[in-house]
Amino acid sequence: MELTDNALKVLKRRYLLKDECGKVIETPEQMFRRVANYVASADLMYHERTDSGQEFYNVMANLEFLPNSPTLMNAGTKIQQLAACFVLPVKDSLEDIFETLKTAALIHQSGGGTGFSFSRLRPAGDIVGTTGGIASGPVSFMGVFDAATGAVRQGGRRRGANMGILRVDHPDIIEFITTKRQPGALTNFNLSVAVTDRFMEAVEKGESYELINPRTGKVTASKEAMKVFDLMVESAWSCGEPGILFIDRMNRDNPTPGIGMIEATNPCGEQPLLAYEACNLGSINLNKMVTNGRIDYDKLGRIIDIAIRFLDNVIDLEEFGLDKITRMVKGNRKIGLGVMGFADMLIRLGIPYNSTGAIKVAEEVMGFIDQRAVQASEEIAKRRGVFKNFIGSTYDRSNGARVRNATLVTIAPTGTISIIAGCSSGIEPIYAVSYIKTVMEGEKLTFTDSYFEYIAKREGFYSAELMVRIAAVGSVSGMLEVPDPIQKLFVTSHDMEYEWHIRLQAAFQKYVLNAVSKTINFKYDASKEEVSGAFKLAYDLGCKGITVYRDHSRNEQVLECNYCTAESGSF
């Protein structure tokens, strides 16, 4: 196996099984075999005898495909919670709020992340009919959820992760937008505003929009949309939050509208889910799909077929401990196949990330993955049947695909599995040619792009002194020793204008029914007008959400070098 030192550190710290004394008792090969054999055992439920176990092992051991972290951690163990993404409802009663909190704690303990919409909670200052008291509002209850998450350390292997969402028309939206400007506030949450089309139209036209009390359904006030939008921009510029979810766009692509409306996503925003839904994800390493300077679509197609079968099998094996989640998961059978190593693929193809060529590759690759995933799901459905809630779904029409899974593709951040695979994360550009990443509750790992070193030696401009200087600044931009075409090829996240980040995200979104996790990185001296432009461009180009991060706008950051730092967008 081609495991890097960093991959081995992550595996030993977080993924490999340990005994009661904390001693590692499993090798990486044994982990992949444990996961592969367990996931393949689902075939027996359908009286199918195949060589799935060996196929599943091969694609993982070759680092061509990896499932989400809970599957790697838990498959074949006593803990059979294998999904990464959950959405739980937060209803407007104290009993329901704390019942949801209990469920969230159990999910965190088993390695999952949770998303919540707090939009149904009555605003601060509203009346509490049962006691005659005054409601404290959604943000105060988010503090309770945040404290509980901090107390549950996901089996000591993963930090608890939440997404907190509030609709833009909730009366407490101003408090929500500004709450994370306070140091130490809601540290276990990512925050996003659920923005409506009506709001964006009001921003464009300079109009006001209405705030609505969710308890009564009545209008409580009106706000100038542009002022609220500017406040979101200012907060995102100041501390990276909140992000934006274009909630109406998400619901237009909701495959089962008869079952419910989408109100929230998982912690990194790429997986819109109904209440009590869960989704297991997996990612293909695109760096492994390049052969002799070209994309090997035959190989990619084979990996997609195996990955879809793998992810569908997981649904039959995972256990949640809550009947409501089990019914929703088995009813819709949502999976999310995505990619990692996209930036590495572009480099191996000789295509700069910030180019029309990269956009073309993104559309071609994701279009192929989407089409092949549908075909693979249809093949499984022929043997095992369509998902239970198929009738009444958007697929339920004369020309609709008879698929096994209500959703198939998602672009996740792949924060740690990309370290295991030794590739760039998700669809992000390379952060730097050399940088430090903080993982696993404070451990710092150093990364240097091995392909850059290879090219530098091949082209004759490598030197130890050059590598030291690159490590100090992260980027090779402007370095005279590095040929101009190489500088352009190894463009980093801070070397390019924000428009390229968003155009690449939008290119993938065209072929992703769910959503796309992507951080739009800005330099420290970026203006608020640039952040505003990014928000508007993401909406105009059809993205389902956007997260921005301005360098040094937080005290603690995941990625760092001496010159530039950034938030990874991943827990």
Image (cartoon, helix red, strand yellow):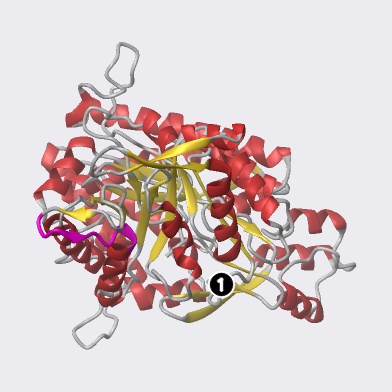
Q: Nearer the viewer, residue 188 or 462?
A: 188
Q: Residue furthest bottom?
A: 21
Left or right of 261, for residue 425: right
Please tell me in which quadrant of the rendered image residue 61 appears.
Answer: bottom left
Which residue is label 1 attached to? 554
Please tell me in which quadrant of the rendered image residue 124 appears.
Answer: bottom left
Number of numbered discs present? Answer: 1
Query: What range of the chain is rendered magenta?
Result: 130-139
Image quarter hosting the C terminus: bottom left
Q: Residue sitting at 72 percent across and 38 percent down?
A: 356
Q: Residue furthest front?
A: 132
Tell whether position 136 is magenta. yes
Q: Nearer the viewer, residue 351 or 194?
A: 194
458 in relation to 262, above or below = below
Image quarter hosting the N terminus: bottom left
* Res. 297 visible in picture: no
